[in-house]
Amino acid sequence: MPTRLPVPRRPAAVLFDMDGVLVDTFDAWVAVIDESRSRRGLDPLGPAGVRACWGQGLLADCETIFPGEDPARLAAEYDAGFLKHLGRVLPEPGARDAVTAIRAAGCRTAVVTNSPVALAERIVRLVGLEGGFDAIAGGDEVPRGKPDPDLVLLALGRLDVDASRAVLVGDTRLDLEAGRGAGVAVVGYRLDGADARIEHLAGLLPLLGFGA
């Protein structure tokens, strides 16, 4: 495991993963995955089965959930299915307050997600976070999504912020690897192994030096 990075106090930018950090998309993904399995004559995974492979990434899904599936085809199916189940998406508790307080402190913010950028923008609006971010970097804008660092680097470029002055908040190993690859300190949202860990998004504020 690489050496942990120091989490900067009063960073110039905070980058947020979307699914599982800003929004609760778990119920939507259970529906999407189980419908996709049903089309193939496979048994549903249900919440417990999806939880067991949560956050492993598209390529791993093509190996374990849909063996032999083409990643591009599955990605398009996921996108269409997710749009169908947008009504199941909810804001993560404390997300609005945390983003508002961080921006009020003069810190720039961005969303860094493997979801297509248009879908990410729609979800941000849906949960009342429109106008809360200086940039949104989506998976269809780079050759490789997380765990590669491309998305993180894209967001940093749009914000014009150096990696040493930024923090990425994520909830999966994909976020951890992407942040580490970009040289950005990672705050794990209920995730072990990151440079710091928080249990609630309100915990970001004192951790980063933005007050309570």
Image (tube, rainbow, N blue to C red):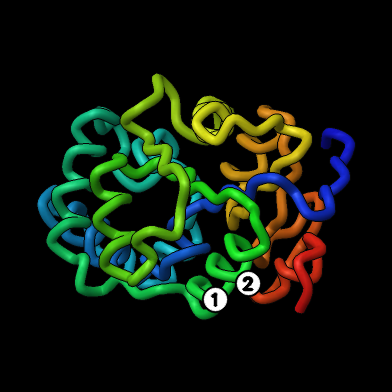
Percent x, y for residue 44? 25, 64
Q: Amino acid at mark 1?
A: Asp
Percent x, y for residue 140? 31, 31
Q: Which residue does the numbered mark 1 point to in the structure image? A: 97
* Secondary structure beneath label 2: helix
Percent x, y for residue 170? 60, 53
Q: Which residue does the numbered mark 2 point to in the structure image? A: 201
- Extreme top residue here? 143
Tags 2 and 1 in contact by the CB under 8 Å rule? Answer: yes
| Residue displayed at 46% across by 53% down | 133
Task: Please state if 198 lies on the left or on the right of 19 as rendered.
Answer: right
Instruction: Name the foreground residue: 193 vs 16.
Output: 16
Instruction: Name the foreground residue: 11 vs 117.
Output: 11
| Residue displayed at 32% across by 37% down | 67
Q: Is residue 150 above or below residue 61?
A: above
| Residue displayed at 72% across by 69% down | 205
| Residue displayed at 59% across by 57% down | 171
Instruction: Name the foreground residue: 202 vs 57.
Output: 202
Tell me which label, 2 or 1, sits earlier in the chain: 1
